[in-house]
Amino acid sequence: MTAPTTGLRMRRTGRHLVAVLTGALLLVMAPTTSSARPAAARPTAGTPHHTVVDRTTGDREAWTGTWATTPTAAPASDATAFEDETVRQTVRTSIGGDRIRIRLSNEFGAGPLVIGEAHVARRAGSGPASRIDPRTDRPLTFGGRASVTIPAGAPLLSDPVSLRVPAGSDLVVSIHLPEHTPGSTLHAFAFQHNFVASGNVTARTDIAPTATVDRWYFLTGVSVGTARREGSSAVVAFGDSITDGSGTDVDADHRWPDFLAGRLRAARGPYGVGVLNQGISGNRLLHDPNPPAGSDAVNYAVYFGQSALRRFDRDVASQPGAEHLIVLLGVNDLGHPGTVAPESERVTAAELIDAHRQIIARAHDRGLKVYGGTILPFKNDTLGFYSPGNEAARQAVNRWIRTGGEYDGVIDFDKALRDPADPEILLARYDSGDHLHPNDAGAEAMAGAVPLHLLR
């Protein structure tokens, strides 16, 4: 099974290899180079999961996530590596603050990850996409050190740095990798162009890219904080390719969580609400990637990430300031078996509902309010997901989400995007072309379907 080629690519002088992906409208390169139940108790501001004491001032400071992505491993076929190179990566903030801290990750590395130097800055308002505003350039430290080694399997938080960050602005994080460094911990579906350059150019205003990548490497989170931000919170969008942004324009920040962040900023409530995109293309609720031996999926399925049940604690429960969770998962559990996963992993509607119940229970255990998103229609999809049996399961799961009363609220994405003349298909103006993933207009309509009062 193949999917249309989209913006996931890496360009470098020399040969390159494009691998067409699957189940979630994925294109990946293996480069040659380096009605609701009562709401759960709301966490009070200043709970340990997003409050720290500044070691230099002694002030208590509330931290809230403004951007996040989910790390995955790389398949054996992905030979990407860096050596004495700088990776310059851009992220879009959802809320602003006076101070920031960065989360790096070596969670899928087989050995230590050496960071030679790292900087953060705001993107320049004009010129190349790789240009930073030098007035905002700040070196990052880790326990007071400019260089740090991250053990295999571990994440690492930077020290806080003073930098005024407006909501809805672009931040640029530059990481120098001095040693031979496999690209082992990454988010392969960024829908954002990032850049690689030779040497340590972390502080340079302009760089000369030797490669352009549509991935995020080793960077998984940005948090903002001020002493006045105790009332801020974050909502985690927990999903698959539809949340990740498949089908939307590269470099446009037109994923539905991006549009939701824009709506929340425009609403101008008393406190900011950060939006953290924890979607992974190809992700499933119940199963890790398990491509059939000998299939093309062996070359890319690892990018689909660990199952939602497995990654919940890292990607949801540990997010700074998280108080809300939107769940949109299940379409790949229905569509992958028999395509990019073994037929033996086929699931029933009852099994999907039980998985959703686990997400609800674990969210409530952490004091999160959790909202169920109905699964979008996918009849006539080009990826081989649709069958009458899968449609019946989708309808059963959606009926339970709408009427079961177990979620704290319902976000009816299905109703917002389906064709009234044939509710089993996406409305044409929202269809990216594969009849499964919404386009930019569809992503905006999804964000519009979220009742903002749920997130206040």
Image (cartoon, grey):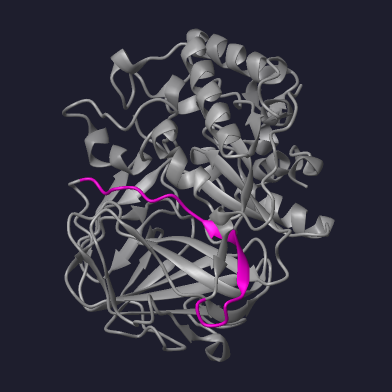
Q: Residue furthest bottom?
A: 135
Q: Residue at x 51, y 12 (%)?
A: 349
Quarter residue 124 falls in: bottom right
* Near-viewer residue (116 or 189): 116
Can residue 220 be seen in this snapshot?
yes
Residue 128 location, x and y as percent? 50, 80
Question: In the image, is 54 to the left or to the right of 94?
Answer: left
Can residue 381 be seen in this snapshot?
no
Classify 9 as above or below 198. above
Residue 207 location, x and y as percent? 39, 84
Q: Residue at x 49, y 22 (%)?
A: 355
Residue 385 location, x and y as percent? 45, 22
In this picture, which residue range is highlighted in magenta? 55-75
Classify 110 as above or below 315. below
Q: Quadrant of the N terminus?
A: top left
The question of residue 66 being in magenta is answered with yes
Residue 224 location, x and y as percent? 60, 67
Q: Residue at x 28, y 69 (%)?
A: 12
Question: In the image, is 16 to the left or to the right of 366?
Answer: left
Question: In the image, is 115 to the left or to the right of 362?
Answer: left
* Near-viewer residue (419 or 255): 255
Question: In the image, is 230 to the left or to the right of 206?
Answer: right
Classify 303 as above or below 94. above
Q: Residue at x 41, y 87 (%)?
A: 203
Quarter residue 164 falls in: bottom right
* Near-viewer residue (396 or 146): 146
